[in-house]
Image (tube, rainbow, N blue to C red):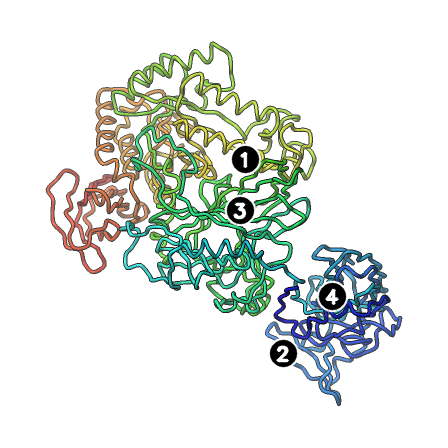
Amino acid sequence: MKFISKKIGLLSLSLFVGSYIGAQSGTVKISEMDLSKIYQPYGNPLKDRAVTGKPLQVAGKVYTSGVGVQADCRIKLILRRKSSLFSCKVGLNDQSVDYITTGLTKVPLTDGTMIYYQNTTGGKQFVGVGGGNGLVEKGSVVFKVLGDGKELYNSGIVRGGEAAKQISLSVKGIDVLELRVEDAGDGISGDHADWLEASLDYFEIKPELVAPDYKGVVKSMDAQVEQHLQKKVKQLKPVALPMEIPSYDWLIKNEQAKTSVLQANKGKDIVLTNGLISRVFRVFPNLATIDIQNLMTGENLLRAVSNEGTLQIDGKSYLLGGLDGQDEFAYTQYSWVDKMYPFPNSFRVTDFDVSEITPRINWANSRWSLVKEWKPFGKQLTFYLEGPDELKGIKVKLHYALYDGLPCISKWFEIENQSGEAVNLDKFVLEQLAMAEPESPVELKEADKFRKPNIHVESDWAFHGFIEKEADETEYWNTDPRYTSQCNYPLVTPCLLEVKLPIGPDELIENKTSFKSFRTWLMPFDSDDRERKGLFVKRLYRTIAPWTTENPIFMHCTSSDPIVVKQAVDQCVETGYEMIILSFGSGLNMENEGPENLAKFKELREYASSKGIEMGGYSLLSSRWISDEVDVINPKTGKTGGMIFGSSPCLSSEWGYDYFRKIKSFYEATGMTVFENDGSYPGNVCASTSHAHHKGLNDSQWKQRKQIANLYQWMCEKGIYTNIPDYGYMLNGGAKVGIGYREVNWSLPRERQLVLGRQVMYDGLWERPSGMCWTFVPLTQYHGGGAAATLEPLSEHLSDYKAHMMQNYGSGVQACYRGHRLYDTDQTKATVKEVIGWYKKYRDILNSDLVHLRRPDGKDWDGIMHVSPYLKQKGFVMLYNPTDKIIDRNISLPLYYTGLTDKAVIREQDGKTQMYLLDRDYRVQVKVSLMARGYTWLVIE
């Protein structure tokens, strides 16, 4: 029998084996055991006395037998499944200590309270915790009893002065019994708890107290598995840790950042790395991530070892891999890992494979894109794990993917059920990482005020937001109860990263079927500079979601009248536009399956296609009411209404499934290639138990979101462009999200619309690529504002119309130019054609990374700069003057991200070029003169 126990040196082998000699039966009192194994924060547990040294007395009744403890207390006993009954009474000991007495010793704590001691001939006797004024509370606690980690008893809140409560529990078949006394939320003052007359009936082997961190006898790795893994690990190229910091900046040049899978620490560890980031896995005696290294800075991101996630199957939780036995959780040394051991009842690693990265989505790449050809390069490391005996036949594939040239690691898992019967995946944690905290505020208590680690965490499971931090639903920063040596006194540092669903999935996995989780991406930054961090994230999207760099030139047509639509198509051809979206209010209805409706829009699409113009349309989904039978049921009321958009249809109802069928059928019948989906699924739960395609509340979010994500992925692979007002679907095939704006602002005077529009783009493009975002320009009156706000007639407001186009195209952001035409006169036509020709001439650089120069404030110039170290045009600057006077300025241009190091050739518009020498900060000073309410641009080569 092999067992591992770091903190129970007194627990000799005779405890496990010798106890079998001379089998006996009987009853044993816990007070007769070795009480030194009990954990509590202050004082010592006492036999047959209260923790204060006074008699055991609860609500005036005196008891002669028991254990007196101080919350928060943990008592752990090993029963070896040989005990039958646990019985006791529990309560708070009556207060009988005079804390005002001057003879007490007071030891101040950092939170302003005091520990009180009584000096005795035998030393110091703990008598309580309270305020410096001598006031100690009556106390309030919760007593809990756990068997093998499962709660068997919970007393609820027990207060001082209440009569003792009786406990009598069957403990048959239990290996480890744990008794806990927890503070009830009002502090530990007066929490002098008593386990009265506590005893266990047993057969053959007498129960024993063990250290509170005892995990039970843990089976080591199977010898054949260990031999197999050692053989495969030895085939990997060795690397010494820590790895070297790269000498290059990957944002400028990343060709050297090739992914590989290596071995380290004499074959104990597997390293997934591309020279920018590394994830280090220990595989013996079980799989665990023991480090994530930010090679760009040389930092180790983890402070402790955890597990690779958790699965709750049929009501019981299981760890995916993981190693236990770490004493200190503020930092880790490799020598400590050598002594760690598997968690009991965890999934165990049996094998691993290394393969090339394959695309998540088979992107059609059927129109202009900044990414001309896309084939992901990198490595995928897959570990194979098998469940414990009770889950025989349940296997898990843990996947980790790392792209070449990008400091970002992706993770997801698959569950394969070969058990012979269905199992239910109630919930799961995809990632659990004990991250090193970036600061240690001693007294801070509110988690949202802590600085978080300097990393980007994102998943492809998000919704209801125009930006990632609004849409993200899976990133949780929690406290780590193991980390008791942290500087934060309340122990609430949010330094345990968990990536998980907010609810569910509550998914039934039938025999011989599988389940796939969502994916998460983790990317460390190498500085706190906002611009640089934003560039990291933009490169992430370009690499893992290249369809977001598609950026077609489109208009919103407000009519589906064939005459109007065909005129709009012809105007698109004349001006260089590429796409028409039949807008809301146009009369397009994709849910109408009538032959006449389908024939009409097929004919319009064919006309557009014959002219080289793509066509598609708008459909409203979630922000609408269908019926009480179809709409999502509010779990708080049991009725419809009160949800994110008030009322919304449940996408897992029959209506929901039919909606998606109709949308697909419409596109297949008409051949349209653009889909604008308004009010895409925002994350509503649904408490209905009568909808056809979900069971109830817990699986409703998972099932609904899967429906719409599958639709967007299908469209991405079919070459159908998706314009979506929800960031949460960009990693699922969505191509464009709204940049954000207040719709009533389009009722303001045109001059103000221009400055406000530039502010929105300046603020909205820190983390998002320009091509991912759309804005809005209503050509006809929108919410109001009259003539002062409206662009139509276009020829009468041509300068403002052109200014809108220049600043939108100049930032790389497409706008929904909403109206029934693009021009009304030859002069207007010439202007639109001129702007589109200019945009296409500089299209690649105008869709490249954006660097911020000066935010629009209406007082002085404002501007942005596009940069690319890979193009002939290394930079493109857009400058604006919102004032009514000419302004002359010397503008400092930061050229570092252009890749230029010594000199730059710059010209204003199509003027003469001028040579500039870069200073030590990679900057040049350029003198410009900006016309009143004018703009200009600079080209950098």
Q: Residue at coordinates 33% horizontally, 33% vertically from top-left?
A: 551
Residue bearing mark 2: 108
Q: SS of the residue at dot 4?
A: strand
Left or right? Give the position of 479 relative to 808.
Answer: right
Q: Residues within 10 Å of mark 3 (few under 14, many from 20)?
A: many
Q: CA distance from mark 1 to mark 2?
A: 54 Å
Q: SS of the residue at dot 3?
A: loop
Left or right? Give the position of 166 relative to 390.
Answer: right
The amino acid type of the residue labelled 3 equals: Thr
Residue bearing mark 1: 705
The reply to whether callout 2 and callout 4 are in contact (CB within 8 Å) is no
Q: SS of the residue at dot 2?
A: strand
The amino acid type of the residue labelled 4 equals: Leu
The reply to whether callout 4 and callout 3 are in contact (CB within 8 Å) is no
Sequence-first tag of 3 and 2: 2
Sequence-first tag of 4 and 1: 4
The amino acid type of the residue labelled 2 equals: Pro
Sequence-first tag of 3 and 1: 3
Q: CA distance from mark 3 to mark 1?
A: 14 Å
Image height check: is 634 above or below 590? Answer: below
Quadrant where the C terminus sits is top left
Q: CA distance from mark 4 to mark 3?
A: 37 Å
**For this rendering, which residue is in front, 316 or 251?**
316
Disc nearest the viewer among 4 and 3: 4
